[in-house]
Image (cartoon, coloured by chain):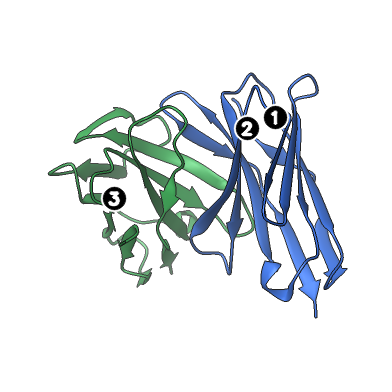
Chain colours: A green, B blue
């Protein structure tokens, strides 16, 4: 079956521009997560969606970062006024309901801010 | 905050050898998971071990968990060139958030 997909695969932007990153989770997965991975580092949690609500936004690094989810499906992560330190791979993951369930990751979007 | 932390090592081994990597964490966990990442992109789930389990096998993978020491190990037996990747442990807490360590880079030389 289809896995988690993300678009674009790569994004190069200029400092100060806004970017939108898209995640299509596995159909039926109610939980959706966004993570950021800087070069050579582990993943940092950004935000968690349960359905269309985001009960945990604690990982968003600044108010330039926002995310939404609609139809309990697609999610968009928006970074406004991008900075060079925003350069990273942004990974999306989804899972079914259940406390022990595995998260399934998309291939990520590699963002480079010049 | 709770976080899996691998021993900061890069392993370079010959094909056929075993690779072992370790992970420690700081607080109580429900379960611990190991993931593999190829070429810095999407992560692939390898194995999950619950807090009441001590050892688990999956194919050539063997995971141990010592909750008293708050540590886990991942053993890959009979390594193959295709096992070359970064390996991350992750602990689960609150809202099933995953807290990842920095990862171990494993290079298997054919």
Q: Nearer the viewer, mark 3 or mark 2?
A: 2
Query: How dense is the environment of label 1, judged by Cα within 10 Å: few (below 14), some, or many (20 and up)?
Result: many
- The disc numbered 2 marks a residue on which chain? B
Residue B3 tag number: 2
Answer with left or right where residue A112 lies relative to residue B52. left
Label 1 sits on residue: B25
Looking at the rendered structure, the secondary structure element under dot 3 is strand
Position of the C terminus of chain B by quadrant: bottom right
Q: Residue at x 73, y 29 (%)?
A: B54
Looking at the rendered structure, the secondary structure element under dot 2 is loop
Residue A77 tag number: 3
| Dot 1 and dot 3 within a common chain | no
Q: Earlier in the sequence, mark 1 or mark 2?
A: 2
Q: CA distance from mark 3 to mark 2?
A: 24 Å
Q: CA distance from mark 1 to mark 2?
A: 6 Å
- Residue A100 is situated, as x and y percent measured from the top left of the image, at 47, 31
């Amino acid at each position: 079956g289809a896995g988690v997909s993300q678009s674009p695969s790569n994004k190069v932007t200029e400092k100060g521009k806004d970017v939108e990153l898209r995640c299509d989770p596995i159909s039926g997965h109610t939980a959706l997560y966004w993570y950021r991975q800087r070069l050579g580092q582990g993943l940092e949690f950004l935000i968690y969606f349960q359905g269309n609500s985001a009960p945990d936004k604690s990982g968003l690094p600044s108010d330039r970062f926002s995310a939404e989810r609609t139809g309990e499906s697609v999610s968009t992560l928006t970074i406004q006024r991008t900075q060079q330190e925003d350069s990273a791979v942004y990974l999306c993951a989804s899972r079914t309901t259940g406390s022990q369930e595995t998260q399934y990751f998309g291939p990520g979007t590699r963002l480079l801010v010049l | 905050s709770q976080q899996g932390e691998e021993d900061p090592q890069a392993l370079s081994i010959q094909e056929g050898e075993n690779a072992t990597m370790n992970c420690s964490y700081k607080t109580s966990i429900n379960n611990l998971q190991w993931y593999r990442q190829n070429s810095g992109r999407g992560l692939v789930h390898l194995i999950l071990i619950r807090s009441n389990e001590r050892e688990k096998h999956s194919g050539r993978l063997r995971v141990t968990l010592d909750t008293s020491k708050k540590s886990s190990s991942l053993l890959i037996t009979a390594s193959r060139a295709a096992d070359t990747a970064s390996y991350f442990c992750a602990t689960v807490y609150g809202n099933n958030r995953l807290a990842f360590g920095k990862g171990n880079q494993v290079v298997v030389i054919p």
